[in-house]
Image (tube, rainbow, N blue to C red):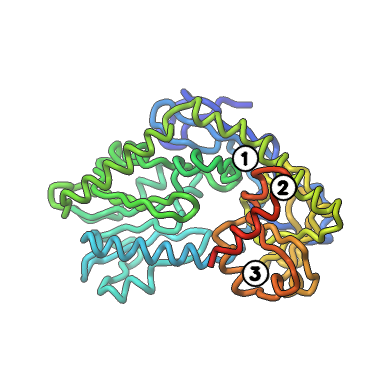
């Protein structure tokens, strides 16, 4: 394989910290009748030793067609971040705001106008540039993408970036966040350093619980003119300190994710096979991109997992890449009266239970797939009440 080259600074100095082997595209769901085989490519995370950006190591081209629906938890997160930005003065009435979009969908546009903010025109300089729906991480050229966002700022303007923190990935052993199409994986200290190279200074950061740890970071090219109080400085310093302590710059700590891969994939496989052995009808919920590598490495195919329900119409009638597990509508999941439903996106758990109460009325159990990986099959009953408490 070619030596990785940093997508921000161009350095070739760095380390592979996670290797999931050849994996199919995580955002392309073939038709159920498509015989395959599905194309695969190396899936590795590389940490640049110079700028500390964690990123996809390999520049590959696989088919992509993001068609998922935005979880309500992500919309709620965006609203909470907006409230914080308004409260701390990073968004002010009359500000012209430019928003960079994302394949994940979702937008600040509607709520912004309710706060007296104005959407900037195409390529118009803006007081605030928002990348609040995880759009930046999809850019193949990370340096160019960040420079485009900075270039839209008026003098004294503020750049707002929201991202799933690498510290949360480490703490939660969330190795399956690594997937084709998601190029950049950010820590707060690392992103502060990248922005510093572009002449911006971080002036605020807030940690939110989404995905185990999502950060909203604010930076400006004119820190002396920004409303930075004592509390904001303390909050930013706290986020930076906790993430450094988690090991976001530590190659050995990041390589610890590799040890979790075989263990957690094996535990999930053991859980499903044990349930099937006792006659349970086991299904999934949430045909998410993060489930693709997990299911492939767990070796769970259409015979073991009977189907995965997803609310996105474009995914229904398709199959999971690599494993050929059918993707079915939620209504069909209800009709099949599953005994166990593994939820592959924990943030969907409450939403799914509320939408499909007949699953539990018929005796079925909702189980967080991450929790199902924690131990032996007879821990199942311990997992179910915990999941049921999420409302």
Discs 1, 3 touching: Cβ within 8 Å: no
Query: At x 48% / y 62%, what residue is drawn?
Result: 74
What crowding class fits label 1: few (fewer than 14 Cα within 10 Å), some (14-19), or many (20 or more)?
Answer: few
- Numbered badge on residue 311: 3
The answer to which of 23 and 64 lies nearer the viewer is 23
Image height of 266 relative to 331, above or below: above
Q: Are marks 3 and 2 in contact (CB under 8 Å)?
A: no
Q: Residue furthest top?
A: 13
Residue tagged by mark 1? 60
The x, y position of residue 76, in whole percent, is: 44, 66
Mark 1 or mark 3, which has the lower sequence index?
1
Q: Residue 13: x, y in percent?
A: 46, 23
Coordinates of residue 258 in the picture (x, y in percent) = 60, 32
**Residue drawn where x is 55% and y is 40% of the image:** 173
Residue 330 in view (yes/no): no
Q: What secondary structure is found at the residue carrying circle 1?
A: loop
Q: Residues within 10 Å of mark 3 (few under 14, many from 20)?
A: many
Residue identified by numbered label 2: 295
Assess disc 2: are there few (<14), some (14-19) or many (≥20) residues with their C-alpha within 10 Å of its C-alpha: many
165 is higher (above) or lower (below) than 94: above
Q: Nearer the viewer, mark 1 or mark 2?
A: 2
């Amino acid at each position: 394989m070619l030596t990785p080259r940093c997508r921000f600074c161009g350095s070739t100095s760095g380390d592979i910290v996670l290797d999931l082997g050849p994996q199919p595209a995580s955002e392309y769901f073939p038709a159920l009748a498509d015989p395959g085989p599905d194309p695969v490519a190396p899936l590795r995370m590389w940490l640049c030793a110079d700028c500390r950006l964690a990123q996809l190591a390999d520049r590959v081209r696989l088919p992509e067609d993001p068609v998922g629906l935005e979880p309500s938890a992500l919309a709620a997160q965006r609203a909470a971040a907006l409230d914080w930005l308004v409260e701390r003065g990073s968004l002010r009435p009359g500000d012209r705001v430019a928003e960079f979009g994302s394949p994940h969908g979702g937008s600040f546009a509607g709520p912004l106008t309710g706060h007296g903010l104005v959407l900037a025109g195409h390529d118009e300089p803006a007081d605030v540039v928002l990348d609040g729906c995880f759009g930046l991480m999809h850019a193949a050229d990370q340096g160019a993408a960040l420079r485009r966002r900075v270039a839209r700022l008026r003098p004294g303007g503020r750049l707002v970036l929201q991202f799933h923190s690498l510290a949360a990935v480490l703490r939660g052993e969330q190795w399956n966040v690594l997937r084709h199409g998601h190029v950049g994986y950010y820590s707060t200290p690392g992103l502060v350093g990248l922005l510093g190279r572009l002449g911006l200074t971080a002036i605020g950061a807030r940690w939110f619980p989404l995905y185990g740890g999502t950060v909203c970071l604010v930076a400006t090219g004119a820190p002396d003119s920004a409303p930075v109080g004592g509390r904001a400085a303390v909050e930013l310093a706290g986020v930076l300190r906790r993430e450094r302590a988690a090991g976001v710059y530590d190659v050995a700590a990041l390589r610890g994710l590799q040890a979790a891969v075989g263990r957690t994939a094996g535990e999930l496989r053991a859980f499903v096979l044990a349930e099937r052995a006792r006659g349970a009808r086991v299904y999934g919920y949430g045909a998410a991109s993060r489930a693709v590598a997990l299911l492939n490495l767990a070796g769970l195919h259409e015979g073991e997992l009977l189907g995965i329900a997803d609310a996105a119409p474009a995914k229904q009638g398709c199959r999971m890449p690599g494993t050929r597990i059918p993707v079915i509508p939620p209504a069909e999941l209800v009709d099949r009266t599953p005994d166990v439903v593994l939820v592959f996106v924990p943030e969907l758990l409450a939403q799914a239970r509320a939408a499909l109460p007949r699953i539990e009325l018929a005796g079925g159990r909702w189980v967080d797939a991450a929790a199902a990986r924690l131990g032996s099959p007879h821990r199942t009953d311990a997992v179910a009440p915990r999941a049921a408490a999420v409302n």
